[in-house]
Amino acid sequence: MQVKRIQFLLLSFLILLKYPSHARSLNDDDVKRSHFPDGFFFGTSTSSYQVEGAYIEDGKGLNNWDVFSHIPGNIKNNDNGDIADNHYYRFLEDIELMRSLGTNAYRFSISWTRILPRGKFGQVNPIGIMFYNKLIDNLLEKGMKPFVTIHHHDIPQELVDRYGGWLSPLMQ
């Protein structure tokens, strides 16, 4: 019975995403945290390129999206992720915002070029490691479970230039 209720709630959520005008028919009593099993994670998620900003600061190298988005006409309004949501500098505020929503989990991706600016060439960037350590430590301090995605479609530009990206067996 509980599984069917959860499936119904998730299906309802997906329908509301597609048909937001139906949201008016829901009230606060329709969905409660108690409808979910103990240990259920309510969380938020991000992609490093879409939120971090600080695109060439503190030793971060260029990734494929940094280069692609700087070619005029590739992105509407020539937008890019140079600043994005400025999560790199505002992650403490972002954690507080997530907590204020009642979440207990955060799925984020690690920017490959923040850790290894040149992919497999060159050195590890200790400042990049320090950033993710501080992010994880602060999430845990606030009782939030970190979930890390190692790759979220941004790869070091050097690997694109040398190998052509994931299409090359040398890259794979």
Image (cartoon, grey):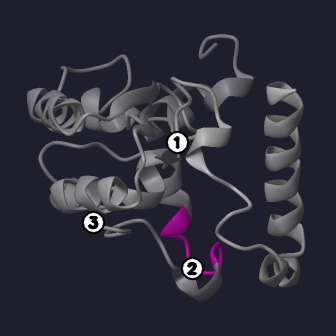
Whether residue 115 sits left or right of residue 38 in the image: it is left
The residue positioned 52% from the left and 54% from the top of the image is: 65
In the image, residue 102 lies at what x, y percent? 40, 53
Judged from the image, the secondary structure of the residue bearing numbered disc 3 is loop
Earlier in the chain: of badge 3 and badge 2, it is 2
Determine contact: label 2, label 1, CB under 8 Å: no
In the image, residue 96 lies at what x, y percent? 23, 58
Distance from the alpha carbon under mark 3 to that under mark 2: 22 Å
Residue 54 visible in the picture? no
Determine contact: label 3, label 1, CB under 8 Å: no
Residue 142 figure quarter: top left
Residue type pointed to by label 1:
Phe
Whether residue 143 sits left or right of residue 101 in the image: it is left
Judged from the image, the secondary structure of the residue bearing numbered disc 2 is loop
Residue type pointed to by label 2:
Pro
Within 10 Å of the Cα at label 3, are there few (<14), some (14-19), or many (20+) other Cα atoms?
A: some
The residue that label 2 is drawn on is 72
Callout in the foreground (3, 1): 1
The residue that label 3 is drawn on is 86
The residue that label 1 is drawn on is 42
Judged from the image, the secondary structure of the residue bearing numbered disc 1 is loop
Magenta stretch mostly in which secondary structure?
loop
Earlier in the chain: of badge 2 and badge 1, it is 1
In the image, residue 54 lies at what x, y percent? 24, 59
- Label placed on residue 15: none
Residue type pointed to by label 3:
Asn
In the image, residue 23 lies at what x, y percent? 79, 77
- Front-most of residues 155 and 109: 109
- Front-most of residues 41 and 133: 41
Q: Magenta residues, as a range? A: 69-75
The image shows residue 126, relative to residue 44, as above or below, that is: above
Assign the C terminus to one quadrant of the image.
Answer: top right
